[in-house]
């Protein structure tokens, strides 16, 4: 399992929505998820995350899901 802590911190520390989304894309790309899961995550990021807070929440859920602890 890859440790994506640094990528998650980069998402959290970004200040604007565009940068957060860009860093979240990097987190998705570096994750160990299947190709289909990565594509679904990218689509969800583009369609549902409209605020910096929502990107942070999405990033947290993505990380926890990868560890089998998805919140919902």
Image (spheres, rainbow, N blue to C red):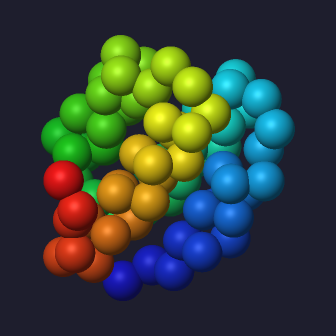
Which of the two residues, 20 or 30, is positioned nearer the viewer here?
Answer: 20
* Residue 17 % position (x, y): 68, 26
Left or right of 44: which side holds 54? right
Q: Is residue 34 above or below residue 41?
A: below
Q: Quadrant of the N terminus?
A: bottom left
Left or right of 46: which side holds 34? left
Q: What residue do we see at 21% from left, 45% from top?
A: 37
- How many numbered marks are there? 0
Which of the two residues, 54 or 25, is positioned nearer the viewer here?
Answer: 54
Q: What residue do we see at 60% from left, 62% from top?
A: 8
* Residue 49 % position (x, y): 45, 26
* Residue 21 % position (x, y): 60, 32
Q: What residue do we see at 78% from left, 53% from top?
A: 13
Q: Is residue 5 above or below residue 30?
A: below
Which of the two residues, 45 or 31, is positioned nearer the viewer here?
Answer: 45
Q: Quadrant of residue 22?
A: top right
* Residue 64 % position (x, y): 33, 69
Residue 56 visible, this angle = yes
Q: What residue do we see at 66% from left, 50% from top?
A: 11
Residue 25 visible, this angle = no
Q: Quadrant of residue 48?
A: top left
């Amino acid at each position: 399992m890859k440790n994506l802590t640094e990528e998650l911190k980069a998402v959290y520390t970004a200040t604007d929505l565009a940068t957060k989304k860009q860093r979240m894309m990097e987190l998705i790309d570096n994750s160990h998820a299947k190709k289909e899961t990565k594509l679904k995550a990218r689509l969800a990021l583009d369609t549902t995350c409209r605020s910096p807070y929502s990107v942070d929440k999405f990033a947290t859920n993505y990380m926890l899901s990868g560890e089998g602890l998805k919140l919902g």
